Amino acid sequence: MHKVLTFHSVFISFCVLFIIKLTYCKPLTFKKDLGDSQLTLDKLKPQDHLDALKMEHDGHINREYHKELFLGNHEDMEKDAQNADSKLKDIFYRVDGDKDEFLTEAELESWIKLKMEEHFDEALQENDEIFEHLDPDKNGKIHWKEYYVHFLLAMDIPEDTARKHVTDYDQIDLDSNAKEDLIRYKFRWTDADEDPADNELTKLEFLAFRHPEQAPKTLKNMVSSIINTLDLNDDHILSEEEFTALPPGEVEEQDQRDLDQQWQAERKKEFQLAVDTNHDGKATEEELKKYLDPKNPLQAVMEARNLINLIDVNKDGKLSLTEIMNRKDIFLSSKICDFARNLHDEF
């Protein structure tokens, strides 16, 4: 299994001192009443996995993409495995607008657009709820230190200690994972902090912090981050070889090597069919941006065509219920997908 890469402890210490103390000199007045309820870490952490986005922050392909765009909330279906087949059939008949028992490209495109809008609406609603919780005085802004206090509270640190720590930074000895998280979140916070760059986020800026795909600036930064992660020769362009390169580390078991080969084959196919749109063997920043941007109207068209290419056995340009059920592994969990997801998470 590929070895996990972490920051060097000295680098972590330096970043914690530099980034967390990178605040404005004006004193911060904390919002007095945090209330009896508090947010969990899962709610507070910006999402590393973004629904309906083709690629993760670290440059790995989103293996849930087909599920997210066709099934919507696929987690519920996967939890109820006994009824998964009947639910998949129900979705088929809902997509089949003219009731001819076939799914055309146009029908798939319309359905995918609907699922995309649902994902975006869900992100907006959750963002509003979290923002309202972090902004009890309703001034329309959240300071980084306020967010930091809630982060510490979610770690079961007493409120007085948390508030003192974000002022003098010597009250709590955070573990390396928490430090790494805060470093990444501070960078993302700064990315989302538009003019004036005041270390405070409005509701729209907070949305960009949690969902960088929702704002042009943070989407651009996400593209740059992916290129920096995968670009081996620092030319700011991704070749097919760079896009399909395996993560660092050795694997020993044959089944793991087989999965590596499968992973590379999937990456190669994705690069050739969806990323490298002018087929010159390279992916520019603009090509990656179009590939990632979920608001690009071509996304639904491309995904509809992709599903037909994957599932249409008799090549009649449309999907029957039988073809869908024969390839239900695309939409429902499989052992290979679970293993690959775990390997991705660990890397």
Image (cartoon, rainbow, N blue to C red):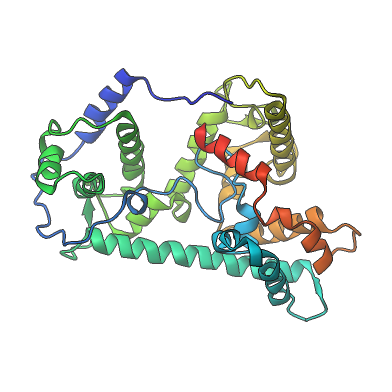
- Asked if one can make out residue 35 in the rendered structure from this viewpoint, the answer is yes
Q: Residue at x 61, y 19 (%)?
A: 250
**Residue 164 locus on image (x, y percent):** 9, 40
**Quadrant, the N terminus:** top right
Taking 118 as reference, is 242 above or below it? above
Residue reaching furthest front?
A: 82
**Residue 168 locus on image (x, y percent):** 10, 34
Taking 245 as reference, is 49 above or below it? below
Q: Residue at x 57, y 20 (%)?
A: 249
Q: In the rendered image, which quarter is residue 73 located in?
A: bottom right
Taking 244 as reference, is 161 above or below it? below
Q: Nearer the viewer, residue 279 or 22?
A: 22
Q: Residue at x 30, y 32 (%)?
A: 179
Q: Residue at x 29, y 60 (%)?
A: 131
Taking 39 as reference, is 128 above or below it? below
Q: In the rendered image, which quarter is residue 107 located in?
A: bottom right
Q: As drawn, is 197 to the left or to the right of 266?
A: left
